[in-house]
């Protein structure tokens, strides 16, 4: 049994940020907005606080966390940057990109936060509330997406409350997250930079700065234990309760529809509910709507969500990745972590 605590929701602003920083410095759990999705933060240097964070999320312990800092200088204090990491940090921070680099000699991040790895995932978010909160806290803050383990990531404070009320101290409401999918994760150690997770910064943009193609992680559902991928990228990580039917060209009886673009699949008129990721076929708009639409379609109780095909390029790759995970077979879960 997890102890029930009262969760306060406060609107972002100077007073809220000061309060939230105080809660973080005292080892509490604070959900806050970033440009990608809402994060559930705690002091990265406080091992006991990080253990409480894992418990609140019901997250498997082997899944390491991203340390968030307010600026590039703070990031450099935590890890060792090679030429690729330097170039990416310079080009894309602050922004929706995470770099995995070897831990610095005196890195203060607790071992439990990196699941014993000698590398550390670091991110400098561009969201003003996230930036100000990190600056006010003055310590690295680990922040996984602020959902229960196995649920889709939250893009609003209301999503966070649905999943985590009674389990965390504070939710800072900064409105909907603009990007809508999690950061792109690039590993910068070893011979070649590798894309561990497609995300809110398109692969094409990363490659333009690197000047070389990024080696990709293994596709969802393939058994390639030695493939370079984020250890926490469980196949069914992003799971609504409904089953997903991808690349649907028609809607079957009883299904609800997640559409993309102006042309709807055949039988769309028989769907009990239709939500469109982007009627004008814009991938940035689609990414921003993805998780909220999945939650809303799931809430209808329909057994199956038919999902129209999404283009592969740009942010489409991150959207496809999240949809493939949401559609993957589910492992059996410990009820306490559900
Ligand atoms: O956009 C984001 O990245 C959001 C916001 C809140 O910043 N955060 C987020 O965190 O998505 P999370 O914990 O849901 O996903 C972090 C991913 C996991 O798949 C984890 O396995 C991977 O990062 N990761 C963390 N540290 C790693 C490391 N040292 N090596 C490889 N992968 C790592
Ligand atoms: Mg997550």
Image (cartoon, grey):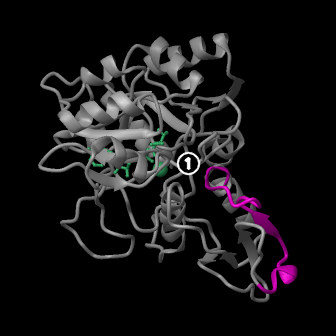
Query: Is 87 drawn above or below residue 335 in the view shown?
Result: above
**Position of residue 336 in the picture relative to residue 251 (left or right):** left
Q: Nearer the viewer, residue 313 or 78?
A: 313
Q: Residue at x 45, y 64 (%)?
A: 334
Decide which of 224, 279 is in the foreground and name it: 279
On screen, residue 245 versus residue 96, left or right, reads: right
Label 1 belongs to which residue? 147
> Residue 254 location in percent, x, y?
78, 84
Compared with 316, 106 (above or below) is above
Number of numbered labels in the structure image: 1
* Residue sitting farthest toward the bottom: 253
Q: Residue at x 65, y 11 (%)?
A: 14
Q: Quadrant of residue 83?
A: top left
Q: Is residue 190 visible?
A: yes
Asked if one can make out residue 102 in the rendered structure from this viewpoint, the answer is no
**5 on left or right of 10:** left
In magenta, the rendered stretch is: 266-285
Residue 212 magenta: no
* Label 1: which secondary element: loop
């Amino acid at each position: 049994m997890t102890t029930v605590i009262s969760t306060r929701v406060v609107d972002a602003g100077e007073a809220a940020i000061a309060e939230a920083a105080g809660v973080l410095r005292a080892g509490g759990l604070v959900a806050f907005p970033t440009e990608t999705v809402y994060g559930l933060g705690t002091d990265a240097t406080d091992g006991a606080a990080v253990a409480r964070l894992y418990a609140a999320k019901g997250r498997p312990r082997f899944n390491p966390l991203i340390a968030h800092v307010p600026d590039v200088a703070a990031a450099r204090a935590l890890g060792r940057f090679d030429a690729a990491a330097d170039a990416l940090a310079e080009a894309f921070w602050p922004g929706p990109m995470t770099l995995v680099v070897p831990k610095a000699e005196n890195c203060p991040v607790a071992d439990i936060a990196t699941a014993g790895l000698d590398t550390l995932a670091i991110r400098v978010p561009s969201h003003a509330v996230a930036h100000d909160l990190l600056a006010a806290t003055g310590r690295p803050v680990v922040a996984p997406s602020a959902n229960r383990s196995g649920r889709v990531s939250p893009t609003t404070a209301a999503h966070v409350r649905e999943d985590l009320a009674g389990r965390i101290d504070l939710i800072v409401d900064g409105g909907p997250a603009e990007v809508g999918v999690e950061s792109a994760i690039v590993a910068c150690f070893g011979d070649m930079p590798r894309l561990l997770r497609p995300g809110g910064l398109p692969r094409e943009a990363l490659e333009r700065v690197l000047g070389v193609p990024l080696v990709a992680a293994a596709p969802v559902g393939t058994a390639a234990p030695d493939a370079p991928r984020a250890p926490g990228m469980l196949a069914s990580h992003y799971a609504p309760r409904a089953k997903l039917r991808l690349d649907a060209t028609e809607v079957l009886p009883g299904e609800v529809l997640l559409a993309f673009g102006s042309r709807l699949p055949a039988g769309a008129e028989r769907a009990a509910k239709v939500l469109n990721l982007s009627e004008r076929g814009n991938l940035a708009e689609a990414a921003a709507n993805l998780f909220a639409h999945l939650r809303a379609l799931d809430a209808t109780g329909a057994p199956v969500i038919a999902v129209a095909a999404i283009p592969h390029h740009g942010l489409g790759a991150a959207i496809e990745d999240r949809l493939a995970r949401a559609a993957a077979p589910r492992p059996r879960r410990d009820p306490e972590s559900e």
